[in-house]
Amino acid sequence: MGDIVRLQKYIAMCGVASRRAAEELIQRGQVRVNGEVVRELGTKVEVGADAVEVAGKLIKAASKNYYIMLNKPVGYVSTVKDQFDRPTVIDLLQDEIKSRIFPVGRLDYDTQGLLLLTNDGDFTYKVTHPKFKVDKTYIATLKGGLTIRGLQMLRRGVVIDGYKTAPAEVEILSAEQGKTMVRITIHEGKNRQVRKMMEAVGSKVTALERISIGKVALGNLPLGRWRYLTSHEINYLKNL
Ligand code: URA
């Protein structure tokens, strides 16, 4: 007999969606168990015995979970498929990883650095949902300077798209003529957040790199290369 698990957990185990998104799929009537639509959260299924379909497609428990770190170069989208056919981060892995894996959150097309990828929907939920407040640290290159007042505003929180950001940790790393390097740590994941925060204080980001997620750091992984997370890193991120 296979393990008996809750339906939403099973859907997450299959890498189809996070557990929360799976609950929504169930409530919307998108999930069938052995041919019958099930809308009841907490319905139990037997792994390997019950046939579970999501939006008409039979899903299978991933036999193995993948947890990968990529040093994303500029010029790649962090989605599985791009509507404009631009290169995707999956293109950088697909020679070696044959399973379906998904980026954990996003980095902009023009941002480089640490991107996690996995087929574990629960892991993605943990690392990306704002309620877990996982710190993400970036090095931003700014055109021109950053004023003391700008620095203080970033540290208190600024308004972007009508939303007040949480206080950020910000430090100036270097300031040469015409160029300032700043380290900034945030835990929210608004669209183009760092760029917009800098804009809000009158600075323009010319390059952006994510260097860490929580204590998991990019280190010296070369641009465009990937590696498996260590079991220590996986457990750390799962238990944040
Ligand atoms: N902030 C941005 O502006 N872009 C990213 O890709 C990530 C954070």
Image (cartoon, rainbow, N blue to C red):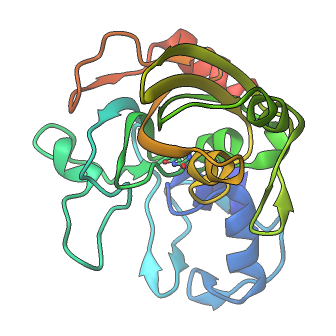
Apparent side of residue 236 relative to residue 157 in the rendered image (left or right): left
Q: Nearer the viewer, residue 151 or 85?
A: 151
The single residue placed furthest to the left in the displayed view is 95
Apparent side of residue 108 relative to residue 197 in the rendered image (left or right): left
Q: Is residue 65 visible?
A: no
Apparent side of residue 8 relative to residue 212 in the rendered image (left or right): right
Q: Residue at x 43, y 80 (%)?
A: 57
Quadrant holding the C terminus: top right
* Residue 227, percent from left and from top: 30, 22
Picture mark count: 0
Which corner quadrant of the image does residue 65 belong to? top left
Q: Is residue 229 visible?
A: yes
* Residue 11, percent from left and from top: 60, 61
Q: Residue at x 51, y 72 (%)?
A: 51
Q: Residue at x 83, y 70 (%)?
A: 41
Q: Nearer the viewer, residue 137 or 154?
A: 154
Q: Residue at x 83, y 68 (%)?
A: 162
* Residue 178, percent from left and from top: 42, 30
* Residue 232, percent from left and from top: 56, 10
Apparent side of residue 138 relative to residue 39 in the rendered image (left or right): left
Q: Is residue 13 above or below residue 178?
A: below
Q: Nearer the viewer, residue 75 or 161?
A: 161
Q: Is residue 135 above or below residue 172?
A: below
Which corner quadrant of the image does residue 63 belong to? top left
